[in-house]
Image (cartoon, helix red, strand yellow):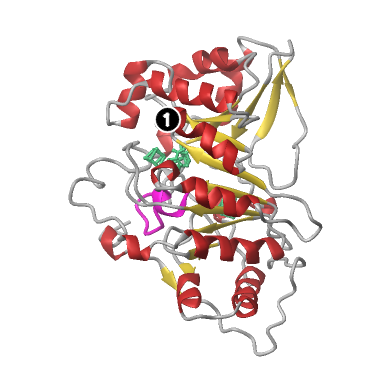
Amino acid sequence: MGETVIPLADLRYAAPVPAIPADLTAPNGLLADRLGRPLRDLRISVTDRCNFRCSYCMPKDVFDRDYVFLPQTSLLSFEEIARLARIFVAHGVQKIRLTGGEPLLRKGLEGLVEMLSELRTPDGAPLDLTLTTNGSVLARKAKALSAAGLKRVTVSLDALDDVVFRRMNDVDFPVADVLDGIAAAQSAGLGPIKVNMVVKRGTNDHEIVAMARHFRHSGIVLRFIEYMDVGGSNGWRMDEVLPSARVLDLLRAQWPMQALDASMTGETAERWRYADGAGEIGLISSVTQAFCRDCNRARLSTEGKLFMCLFATAGHDLRTLLRQGRSDAEISAALGQVWAGRDDRYSELRAAQPADRGAGQRRVEMHYIGG
Ligand code: SAM
Ligand code: SF4
Ligand code: SF4
């Protein structure tokens, strides 16, 4: 299709924040976007750096020695993040997920967790505060994170076989250390733990049953994620996507499975349980079964840009508002305007397009926006 290739360094994804209305009366807590969806879930990326180079996210040939990550001064400080989070919570956010890049590489992250754990929803409830990590340093940090007020963690793990795992993280990182991290999180009470496995056909689909067997009876929910066409550097191809329906077939060939109801609106995973009581799994079918209709998630990038969709091409610059010394009321009103104007539903639209549409387009990268 001859799409223009834009150098990654130029992709700072800036879209203006809509004008702040004069009366500054954002309808706190009553926000709905143009498709009637409330704002409930905020994902905050705390760093664009990572010690892994998963080919589906930060392929080595793009994210090499010469790749320029954001400078420290561009990052939102913990105080800035906590201030924005408070405003988001006033607008209806009930769940905050810290992500990245690898969030545990951000120095002193426990300090941010502590600040966020003090936030309360308008009806006085604590937040569902969680974090997604590659698990590489979790064994060292689980206790401190739990003490700081983190409720639970999601750990990404794409294979149990050490050779396959090292190949997928592409930095020769051993699977045993991630398993130690999961065990440490369990002992620290960071549960219920979820494990995310991105399934790439021909790369790790032969690990599906072994992963399922490993996590049966563990109390850990294993979730299989379809490889997504996020960003513009992973060379995504439809033929490398293994539809969740196939994953389910593989599991059903081993164990009787029963469908479960979604535990809450906006949940991304379709839930199934083993009929023998060995636990639960999730299927995240972002490619083959769009779930935009209930999407109540916003994403705050490392440098304070607000994205309304994982597949957005531009974000609204909240950092400028913060650093201009705008008041909470002004920022709140701007956020209200942005959400009220939201009509994103990329996956639904993609489903209606030819199979390879989307590959190579200019979109935000996953490590920057946070998964
Ligand atoms: N570094 C942390 C980690 O890997 O858990 C947090 C950030 S990572 C971007 C968040 C999640 O996005 C991970 O579970 C990862 O597997 C998932 N992810 C990244 N690229 C993906 C892709 N192309 N398709 C599906 N999931 C992807
Ligand atoms: Fe790093 Fe997570 Fe992306 Fe893998 S998926 S490269 S661990 S940010
Ligand atoms: Fe939400 Fe965008 Fe994903 Fe649809 S494609 S579920 S709107 S993040």
The stretch drawn in magenta includes residue 37 = no
Residue drawn 56% across the image and 60% down it: 82
Name the foreground residue: 154 vs 261.
154
Q: Is residue 72 left or right of residue 135?
A: left
User: Is residue 25 shown left or right of residue 326?
Assistant: right
Q: Is residue 349 above or below residue 134?
A: below
Residue 58 relative to residue 346: left or right: left
Quadrant position of residue 253: top right
- Judged from the image, the secondary structure of the residue bearing numbered disc 1 is loop
Q: Which residue is mark 1?
A: 200
Q: Residue 147, how many percent across, how many down?
A: 59, 38
Q: Is residue 368 magenta?
A: yes
Residue at point 69%, 30% (across, down): 271
Q: Where is residue 215 drawn, in percent x and y?
A: 57, 17
The verdict on label 1 being within 8 Å of ligand 1 is: no
In the depicted structure, whether residue 255 falls above or below residue 314:
above
Q: How many marks?
A: 1
Residue visible at 35% across and 17% down in the picture: 162
Question: Which range is magenta?
Answer: 359-371
Q: Nearer the viewer, residue 186 or 368?
A: 186
Question: Residue 108, position in %: x, y?
Answer: 44, 48
Q: Which secondary structure dominates the residues rendered in magenta?
A: loop
**Quadrant in the rendering for residue 297:** bottom right
Quadrant of the rendering where the N terminus is positioned: bottom left
Q: Quadrant of residue 270?
A: top right
Q: In the image as oriented, which residue stretches furthest toward the left? A: 66
Q: Residue furthest bottom?
A: 22
Give, as a three-letter code, the residue at label 1. Lys
